[in-house]
Amino acid sequence: MRRNLLALTLVIFTLLTACAAPAAEPDSRWDPALKNALGLTPAQRLEDYDYFVKTLKDSYLCLGVHDRENPDDPAERVFAGYREMILENDSDEAFYSAVYSSLYRLGPYGHLWIIEPEDYDGMLDWCGHEDTSGRERWKELIEASEEQYKTLKTYLDSLGEDEGGGSWSGGEAGENLHTLLLPEAGVAYLKVDSFLTDYDPNYQTEAQAIRDFYNAAGGCTDLIIDLTDNSGGSELYWQNLLVPPLIDAPLSCTNYALLADSENNRPYIENVFAPEDLHPIAELPDLPKLNRDGLEAATHFVESTLRVEPAAERAAFHGRVWLLVGPMVYSASESFSVFCQATGFATLVGAQTGGDGIGALNPIMMRLPNSGILIQFTMMYGLNPDGSSSEEAGTTPDIPSPAGEPALVTALRAVREARK
């Protein structure tokens, strides 16, 4: 919720200062001392912003997606406008607004976003308490920015404290799992709103709840899993909890994903892939719907495989599985949708998904050299079987819902048809 308020604040600030003429320093609505709170010189601000732009162009493969979906606001216009704002305003405040607002206008394609202090604190804790083997580059950049993020947190807290307009609250968190068992109708319904990480305190509780529900549904012919409000989380959730209890043999699917072997990306590539995993982009098979516009930076592709093994003990449910999907389905929930459709584990019902679930890998980061600000994005550019972008096209359900009809209604009708 804080992101919404901060985004609005920074974008309004940007619009006001961008329209100012002649160029002048922005008036700070906060403590004047914060105007240069990050301790950057004009040259350092410009160096950071130019590094930000260059790294996106040679490392992040979704700029073409943004430009196709936002033809009136292409990335080049965004970059040029905010670079000019930094030049015209001798202020750390203007610099941070330029970076933040650039990301806001470029959109969330491929998990593109700034690492904010509250998220950074969790990452730093991960560096100190979790096994980071195979994630050395993530750890290196996170730890390198510790002092800068202390300063940034002070700066952003001051922005929020002086807004004086109340506060945002999401209210108390609701239940993540929702279940309904209709034995007379032979239908079991499971709704999962988020895929928790395996270190979430509720993970084991939900693991047992899902296992118990699958066993209680043993007399049902059909299981409906609802992801319509699920925008992702951890792939391990569905790989460990949702699929294994319901299969008797391993299931796997393979897709292509593109990447750019850039200076920023190379350490991550070396952390994750063996040299033999990387195939030159020239060897990519001919895929009819691959749009190469905006993919000039792509140098290699990998064959991304998801494989799930059966659980040691099979659950009591042995019927058909239906997966409800829609525009909210993204990232880890999208990868589950792709898996279900490719393997036949479940029939997809509903509306087009949000995408970005192929070639899934934790978002990587760039670190701006002077401010230490971290920006995340997906290194992998996943391709659907026809070559279309997973981020751009998402997944088309096997049974689309008619306009205005809830996916659940469509699924229940499909259940009736399947029983005839």
Image: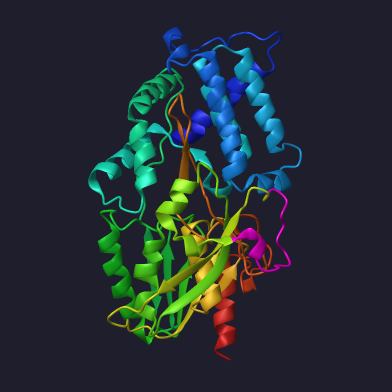
The C terminus, quarter of image? bottom right
Q: Is residue 203 left or right of residue 233?
A: left
Residue 406 image position (x, y, % from top left) = 59, 65
Q: Is residue 166 visible to us here?
A: yes
Q: Nearer the viewer, residue 42 or 182?
A: 42
**How many numbered badges does the structure rendering display?**
0
Residue 45 image position (x, y, % from top left) = 53, 20
60 lies above or below 179: above
Q: Nearer the viewer, residue 353 or 78?
A: 78
Please report the residue visible at 33 percent of the width from the left and 70 percent of the height from the top.
Answer: 210
Q: Is residue 16 visible to us here?
A: no
Q: Locate residue 88: give its quadrant.
A: top right
Residue 363 image position (x, y, % from top left) = 46, 48
Q: Nearer the viewer, residue 232 or 230?
A: 232
84 lies above or below 398: above
Please report the residue visible at 29 percent of the width from the left and 59 percent of the height from the top.
Answer: 203
Q: Locate residue 412: give its quadrant.
A: bottom right
Residue 200 magenta-drawn? no
Tell me the colour scheme of the image. rainbow
Q: Nearer the viewer, residue 278 or 234?
A: 278
Please report the residue visible at 35 percent of the width from the left and 79 percent of the height from the top.
Answer: 310
Residue 281 image position (x, y, % from top left) = 63, 59
Residue extending farthest right: 72
Please report the residue visible at 41 percent of the width from the left and 84 percent of the height from the top.
Answer: 220
Q: Is residue 128 left or right of residue 349?
A: left
Residue 290 magenta-drawn? yes
Residue extending farthest bottom: 420
- The residue segment tinted magenta is 280-294
Examine the residues drawn in magenta and state their main secondary structure. Answer: loop
Residue extending farthest front: 275
48 lies above or below 31: below
The N terminus, quarter of image? top left
